[in-house]
Image: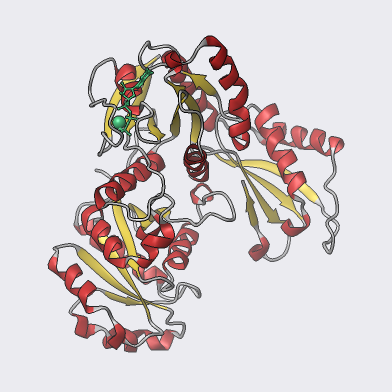
Amino acid sequence: MREAIVAIVGEPNVGKSTLLNKILEQRIALTSNVAGTTRDRFYAPAFWNDVDFTLVDTAGIIFEQREELEKNIQKQVEIALQEADLILYVLDGKKSPETLDRNILLKLRKKKKDIILVINKIDAPKKIKETVDQYHFTGFKNIVALSSVAGIGVGDLLDEITKNLAAKGFAKIEKDPSEISVSLIGKPNVGKSSIFNKIIGEERVVVSATPGTTRNVIDTDIVYKTKKIKFLDTAGLKKKEKKQALPDVYASFQTIRAMHKSDVCILVIDSSLGITQQDQRIAGEIVAASKGLIIVANKSDLLTPKEQTKLEKNLPDFFEFLWWAPAVQVSAKSGQGISEILDFIVKIEETRHKNIDDETMREFFHAKLKQREPQRLRDERIPKVYSLQQVSTNPPVFLMMVNEPSAISMQFRKFIQNAIIKELQFWGTPVKLKLEAKRGNPKFNEDHT
Ligand SMILES: Nc1nc2c(ncn2[C@@H]2O[C@H](COP(=O)(O)OP(=O)(O)OP(=O)(O)O)[C@@H](O)[C@H]2O)c(=O)[nH]1
Ligand SMILES: [Mg+2]
């Protein structure tokens, strides 16, 4: 069974992101939260009532297109109707039901997709029933009133979602733990499909000099050194354009899905064109999703040996934030570097499943504290750090107990995080460091990635 996709659509400011985050919180999975403080989450794996599903904030799915799609609800609905198994149509409960966009309602009803009408911002529990009643006129069978901020009614929504999905046959997804999923990600025309073909040893997918040749995700299983690897060839992620055509939007949607389903992503760049901002953006997206990463500079056959050396030197400057990721120069044409990619995949997968025992962690932490103590920050308490433990794998997550997360400087967090990668050998994967207050309010807990 494939994973179920639940799409969230709605006008700007109705609380789609808040809802997504609340549902993520309900799961309290250490591994599910995405890195970075600036980045909006728009993709959330969820598990409830024994059903696995993925929530997607449709307004967020498009590459660097979020604000525009946020405004364009028509387009969100189109994508959701095409790609989702269930749609959550979110409305602002503080607005009158009269203001409901009837065109959207018509559009949603015309297609035979299941829809749950979600009336958000109903902060008083006693208003829930009354609100649902007010929306019966829409003709939708499934109406849930809730408050995403307060968390009221979110459990009921999750029950509705899983009831619907279970009726369609969706359940818990049993992933073959011995299989590694790897997707090829990059701009159009960089040679993803060529690499894919080379790896699997046949011309499975179309290769062409026209950018945007690949539209749908294609996967193939291979066995390499006794490891089962599933390769996914994806559509190139195009740069932001004012008006993005719907087929491109669907293609990006599927690429992002493939990326999130993978353990390791291969970021393919075209060495003959140099590295662009778009490559950096795509890399950022992979890191935010906490995936293992290999940088592959393809088309190296087009470079002179001198240029190759230069590229090798320059790569780290372009991807400074990816200093922990291996970079390989590859030619899909000649086959150079292909087996190196495969070896890195196997290595990174092992690393992502590595678990460091508490005793080793204790020794490591003591050694680090001897080297450097956390500095006191202005207007903050004296920082105290108590312990460091690995709390999960794939991706690796470490938990540092402290007196108060806000008292721990960025420098100290980076120092610990970098030392974990370098000294405990966590190359090739993002490593998460979570901070938790030993006593006191869990509200102050923070992530650091
Ligand atoms: N010289 C050279 N050309 C390559 C290499 N890899 C791919 N190409 C060429 O680059 C062009 C694009 O290759 P594709 O494999 O279709 O690229 P893609 O990244 O899958 O492109 P989209 O699916 O459109 O995003 C084709 O003309 C390929 O022949 C390489 O290693 N060397
Ligand atoms: Mg392709």
Query: For this view, does 303 lie left or right of residue 61?
Result: right
Query: For this view, does 113 lie left or right of residue 144?
Result: left
In the rendered image of this protein, does residue 421 appear above or below residue 63?
above
- Quadrant of ligand 2 in image: top left
The quadrant holding residue 323 is: top right
In the image, 99 versus 123, the foreground residue is: 99
Please identify the quadrant where the N terminus is shown. Answer: top left
Q: How is the image coloured?
A: secondary structure
| Image x and y of residue 54, in percent | 35, 52
Query: For this view, does 142 lie left or right of residue 290?
Result: left
Q: Who's the residue at 80% across and 35% down the image?
A: 368
In the rendered image of this protein, does residue 105 appear above or below residue 300?
below
In the rendered image of this protein, does residue 58 appear above or below residue 232?
below
| Image x and y of residue 31, in percent | 51, 47
Q: Who's the residue at 77% across and 33% down the image?
A: 363
In the image, 115 versus 130, the foreground residue is: 115
Query: For this view, does 220 lie left or right of residue 124?
Result: left
| Image x and y of residue 318, in percent | 59, 33
Q: Who's the residue at 62% across and 28% down the image?
A: 316
The quadrant holding residue 272 is: top left
Q: How many marks on residues?
A: 0
The quadrant holding residue 269 is: top left
Whether residue 103 is visible, yes or no, is yes
Whether residue 323 is visible, yes or no, is no
| Image x and y of residue 261, in percent | 38, 41
In the image, 250 versus 314, the foreground residue is: 314
